[in-house]
Image (tube, rainbow, N blue to C red):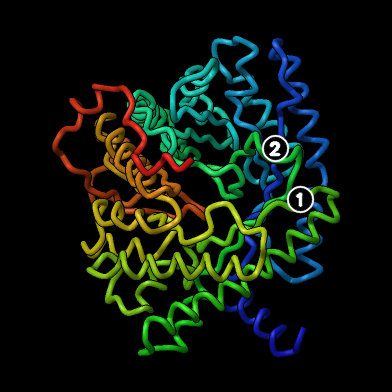
Amino acid sequence: METAKILETIHMISDENLDVRTITMGISLLDCIDSDSSVACQKIYDKITSKAKDLVKVGQAIEAEYGIPIINKRISVTPISLIAAASHDKDYLKYAHTLDRAAKAVGVNFIGGFSALVQKGYQTGDQTLIASLPQVLAETELVCASVNVGSTRSGINMDAVKQMGQVVVAASKKDVMTNAKMVIFCNAVEDNPFMAGAFHGVGERDVVINVGVSGPGVVKTALEKVKGQPLDVVANTIKETAFKVTRMGQLVGTVASERLEVPFGIVDLSLAPTPAVGDSVAQVLEEIGLEQVGTHGTTAALAMLNDAVKKGGIMACSQVGGLSGAFIPVSEDAGMIDAVRAGCLNIEKLEAMTAVCSVGLDMIAVPGDTPAETISAMIADEAAIGMINNKTTAVRVIPVPGAKVGDKVEFGGLLGHAPVMAVNSASSAEMINRGGLIPAPIHSFKN
């Protein structure tokens, strides 16, 4: 590599918050299924602690050797509803505590996969897992959960949407942080390395290494050099920057794969903000020419950003996957928080933005007295956007007991803080209580 390119990469890391956000080891638990839950849990613990025993050590060695920060080392597993169903246990707390113990034993930050895929209906184990979620999230430290309630091919399971609104409210009453560890999806992907929504899909290999790379600050710095230039120049600049960032992720993934003797899966290039100064997706959008994120033109700018990131990633690496694009979590992005406080950004505008970005309504604090049906309706809206547009959408909202609109809620660490946002006060209960299935759209039939 040329000296100038080496220095450029060093500058990106030291001054522009470039990092590998996570290396995530995906582990299949299909061979751990047993009708005796105690036997199954022992198999799960043994497999995770065996396969991932060196994950943290290897990650730290790569950081030291290459000077590339690797912020998180994580594990994703097969959706537990599929693994636990054979046991006929009345709840899946035992499985959750096993995952928590295994994650702590190998030293990872989080373990994802306490999940259910119910887009077309419930199978044995799905409802048991979903009913367990509030207690599981309150009693475990490192376990992350997700439920997929819809897909372009299957439609939206409105019975599950209704139930998940109830789960979110019930979980918030146990601990305000529980819902930060749970995502409700439409069109969930099987190779997502980012928490809280990561799980290891049944179509994946037995064990695999996936890498999540971030760098909003790098993109913003690059755009500062093309002020006033046409938008096609802006798009190309984003694409070229994404190419460089993805190359770094591919390097880390390849080295980790070789040292762990595990196949390399994908690089997920997602501009995931943090509360750190200069690490904001909102500020990237403002650098494009918006006075403040949330104003008219925000959705167009975000669409261009998301598309250019994907194009740059695919140019750099044939194994790009996961979500790859731009995340807009309110609590984790200083620019988003400023826009909410200024009255420029609301939930309705965020919903519009989710039609063109990587995920959905993410890390949004809402009043603690928000009805479960209203949260279900928010989930339904996001699922509809994902279903119709054939893209992944998600909801991670945080009802804060006792909090009112405008209050500040501290989550800590990478989750940052958030102002409590207003929700529409008109009721959606009658629609949500209908239940049933919203059929798949006509354009889902492509065979």
* Front in this rendered view, residue 423 or 436: 436
Q: Is residue 290 visible?
A: yes
Q: Amino acid at mark 2?
A: Ala
For label 2, the residue is 103
Residue at x 46% of width, y 40% of height: 183
Cα gap from disc 1 to disc 2, whole angstroms: 11 Å
Which residue reaches farthest left? 426
Q: Is residue 47 above or below residue 335?
A: above
Near-viewer residue (242 or 53): 242
**Label 1 or label 2, whichever comes before in sequence order:** 1
> Type of residue at label 1?
Val
The residue that label 1 is drawn on is: 56
- Measured as percent of width and height from the top left, residue 437 is found at 33, 26
Q: Which residue is found at the position 78% from the left and 23% from the top?
A: 43
Q: Is residue 212 above or below residue 115?
A: below
Q: Position of residue 84 (x, y in %)?
A: 63, 19
Q: Is residue 292 left or right of residue 281?
A: left
The reply, left or right, for residue 150 in relation to residue 124 is: left
Q: Is residue 383 above or below residue 309?
A: above
Q: Residue at x 34, y 38 (%)?
A: 379
User: Residue 417 falls in which quadrant of the image?
Assistant: bottom left
